[in-house]
Amino acid sequence: MTDIIIRQATVSDFNALGQIMFAAVREGESPYSASQREAWMPTARSGGVWNKRLSAQYVLFAETEGSPIGFMSLAPTDAPNEGYVDFAYILPEARGKGLFRKLYEQIKSEAISRQHSKLFTHASLMAAPAFAKMGFEYLEKEEVEIGGEMLPRFHMHKGISSTLF
């Protein structure tokens, strides 16, 4: 993979992020069945509701050679010391090359700058191992119903600190 550029996403990127999410869920290897994947992501997200949700978050967008390859977001929470990693999607062909770690490290830096001491997420079966490699701990396995299908996922969290010891 050539040079990866990671930058904060703008509204003009949001449709591309919806396409990344669609491809990440629907293409490539997955522990989810075809019917679960279709229920989770029947079409690529776009439009007003999608734009509003992303606009309220700190969203990092990764691209290489002008092509989008992944994104991750930090959403506000009701607790001032906690950050929520809402989205973490990488195209199948860009996986296994360190992109998740690169996105996460920048999300973590932003969370620290916001004085968060903890991050949490609801990770899919596909994303949970990557979050675990970043030091997230499994709190509980959950199932959510989407489009008539039950999809397992994990509630995970991690304490973060700006100190290096």
Image: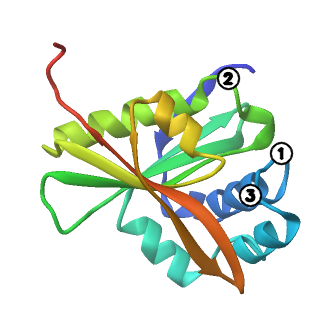
Residues packed near mark 1 inside 10 Å, few (<14), some (14 to 19) or many (20 plus): few
* Residue that appears at 24% across and 65% down: 77
Using the numbered discs, state the Cα–Cα distance from disc 1 to disc 2 in whole angstroms. Answer: 16 Å
Using the numbered discs, state the Cα–Cα distance from disc 2 to disc 3 in whole angstroms. Answer: 18 Å
| Amino acid identity at mark 3 | Val
Per the rendering, the mark at residue 25 is 3
Residues packed near mark 2 inside 10 Å, few (<14), some (14 to 19) or many (20 plus): few
Q: For the C terminus, which image quadrant?
A: top left
Which one is earlier in the sequence, the residue at label 1 or at label 2? 1
Q: Position of residue 76 (x, y in %)?
A: 27, 62
Query: Would residue 158 appear left or right of 135 to someone viewing this image?
Result: left
| Amino acid identity at mark 2 | Lys
* Residue that appears at 18% across and 15% down: 164
Q: Position of residue 140 (x, y in %)?
A: 42, 56
Query: Would residue 15 appear left or right of 131 to someone viewing this image?
Result: right
Towards the viewer: 106 or 68: 106
Using the numbered discs, state the Cα–Cα distance from disc 3 to disc 1 in whole angstroms. Answer: 9 Å
Towards the viewer: 9 or 157: 157
Query: Would residue 28 appear left or right of 17 to someone viewing this image?
Result: right
Q: Position of residue 18 (x, y in %)?
A: 66, 64
Q: For the N terminus, which image quadrant?
A: top right
Residues packed near mark 3 inside 10 Å, few (<14), some (14 to 19) or many (20 plus): many
Q: Position of residue 108 (x, y in %)?
A: 32, 36
Residue under numbered circle 2: 97
